[in-house]
Every structure is written in structure tokens, then in C-alpha cells.
Amino acid sequence: FFLRVNRSAKDDHRDRAMSESKSPGYKHVAYSEIAAEDGRVELEKENIVRPALYSILAGLGAFMFGYTLGFTSPALPAMYGQNSAQVFTVTDCNDSNISSQTGSLFSSIVNIGAVFGAMVAGRLADYIGRKFALASAAIPLVAGWVWLAMVRDPTQAILSRAMAGVGVGMCSSLTPMYISEIAPTAYRGALGALNQLLITIGIFGVYFIGYLLPHEDTTYNSCPNATTSTISTHWPTLAWIGAALSSLLFFVANLLPETPVYLLKIGQTQRACTVMKKLWGRDFDTDDYIRMSIAGRHPDSNRLSVNDDIGGANGSLRWR
């Protein structure tokens, strides 16, 4: 752990911190120093274990972002080939290039779907909450992947990928939003980096799975100079794996705690305090956090205070 204590603070703060670090069952914690206007120094225990775990679980949405983007690299060659998994007809080929206009559209249409998904995600997160919005992002993902795995028609394949793109756009907005709202201040940058890291891991994951799938020789029509290529024709397997992982995202997101930011936004102060203590430690100063939240959005925040029974069943805010 890291301990930052001002020399003017009382020595018992340091003694208490050191004694707790040696106690049985001690978990990795960080002590951050918050200086109030009166110069008082307050130590705040921040637990990193649960926020990190929940961030990784929510990061499954970022993983699916990368998985969906990288899918076409191992899949398209087989979708062009003359085999049982063929979807697109080759329209242009030379010694080093095999392409199709519809195949190119299939590859890029996910970005169009992502635009609409990102536009919907923010409003949905404010309406039903961060975790349920993230769970709902799995619905177009599952539908798109299942549809794609079952079709061999170019038009339906393009539409199914656009549908999956809607889920990708929602995940691209909701995953970093969720992580930033549950992360302790001292670790917000590190946990926020998980989003981009898991996108990259998702891209690598679909490449690696495509590499592991069985390969066979495949011919291409209208390409005398590239008649045979050894590729994996099992791209529907990749699509079914995508559907399974998207279903997992739906169930995992429903098990996550709601963020304190959203709970305070809708006036559920007692639940927000419970979640804050669960995420950031039982000694976390929830009153101070709520005052800071009010100060950020209320023009008369200096006239607001936290009621004494904020941790009780009827926790609320009141005017001074």
C-alpha cells in the first residue's frame, strides 16, 4: 500500500494504518490524503480488489468490441472460397489480392451499426442504469452473431453484421463509462486502461481461435492465378463463439453492482452509500463524496448537506 501523511497530521493515523496492514485477512489497500479547507488531513481507505474485478467483468463488452472488429480477418477468405461456407462471390483477383465489393461492405458495415449503438447507449444508461444498459448491449450482439452463423446469403450476412455493430457501439460507450464510475480515484487511470487493453485482446483472441480451427484447401472462382488456398472454412464456428461470449456478457452485466453515480442521480442515496462502501471500503467517507457530487452539478451546492441518517433506510439530502 501507499501511505501519504502530512507532518501536521496526528501520529495515530499512521499507527492505525500500519497496524491494519499487519492484521489477518488484510487486503491490498491504498491510503489517499484528502485535505479539507480547514487544513485537516483525512485518511481514506480505498479497496482495489472489487473495483478491479468488476472492471474486468464489465470489460467483456470491450473484448466483444475487439472480437467483432477482428472477425473478418480469419473469416473473409473462407467466405469468398468455393466451399460449403461460401457467402460472397469474388469479383476481383490478381496474384496477391482476392476481393469482393459485398465482402468489403460486410467488413465495414459494423462501423455504421456502431454509430447508432453509441447514440442510443448514453440515453439508455441514464434511463435504466449503467449495468442494465451494458447487459442490453448483448442483445444485438447475440442476435447478430446467431443470424450470421446460420446464413449463407450476402444480404443477410451484411445485415447481421450491422446488427452486431449496434452492440459494439453500445459497448464502446458503456464499458468505459461503467469502469470510470466504479474505479477509486487513485486507480481510475489504470482501470480505465483495461477498456483499450481488452479490445486488443479481443482482436487477438479471434485471430488465435481462427488459427486453431481446422484448415483445408479452398478454390476461388474466376481466379486462375489463385485457384487454391489453405484456409479455415469454419468461420461459422467463430460466429457461434461470438454468440456464446455475447450471451455471457448479458448474464455477467446483470450481476454487476450499479454505479454510485447513477444511484445518486436517481435519488437512491442509501443504496449509493452501500455500493460505495462495498467498492471502496467500509471506512470510505460517503458524506464527502456526496457533497462533491452535489458541488459538481448544483448551483446552490453550498447550501446542501447530508442528513445524519444517510446510512439508514431513509437516507436523503436536506437544505441547511
Image: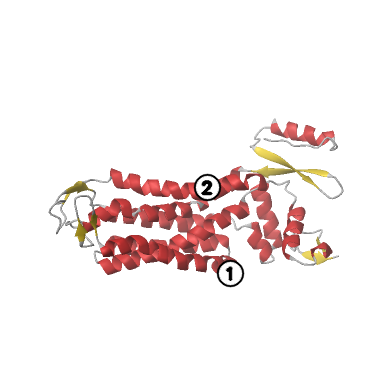
Whether 234 is drawn above or below 110: the answer is above
Q: Position of residue 138 (x, y in %)?
A: 44, 61
Question: Which residue is depicted at the point 68% across and 62% down?
Answer: 264
**Residue occupying image coordinates x 59% and y 67%:** 126
For residue 256, which numbered disc appears in the image?
A: none
Type of the residue with mark 2: Leu
Task: Report if the CB atoms under discs 2 and 1 are less than 8 Å apart.
Answer: no
Give the distance between the C-alpha atoms of the residues marked 2 and 1, in whole angstroms: 26 Å
* Amino acid type of the residue that numbered disc 1 sits on in the rendered structure: Tyr
Q: Which residue, given by chain and number where applicable, does mark 1 sit on?
A: 127
Q: Is residue 225 left or right of residue 300?
A: left
Q: Badge 2: few (under 14), some or many (20 or more) residues near its Cα, within 10 Å?
A: many
Mark 1 is surrounded, within 10 Å at the Cα level, by few (under 14), some (14 to 19) or many (20 or more) other residues, namely few
Q: Residue at x 36, y 61 (%)?
A: 108
Q: Would you say residue 119 is visible in this rendering?
A: yes
Q: Position of residue 118 (x, y in %)?
A: 50, 64
Residue lying farthest top? Answer: 22
Left or right, 105 with reference to 190: left
The residue to which callout 2 is attached is: 194
Instruction: Inspect this view and state whether residue 311 appears.
Output: no
**Going by the picture, which residue comes out furthest to the left?**
224
Residue 155 occupies quadrant:
bottom left
Residue 208 percent location from the top left of the image: 34, 44
- The residue mark sitting in front, 2 or 1, is 2
Q: At x 78% / y 64%, what residue is drawn?
A: 317
Say which quadrant the N terminus sits in.
top right
Quarter containing the C terminus: bottom right
Residue 8: % across, % down: 86, 37
Label whose residue precedes the other's in the sequence (2 or 1)? 1
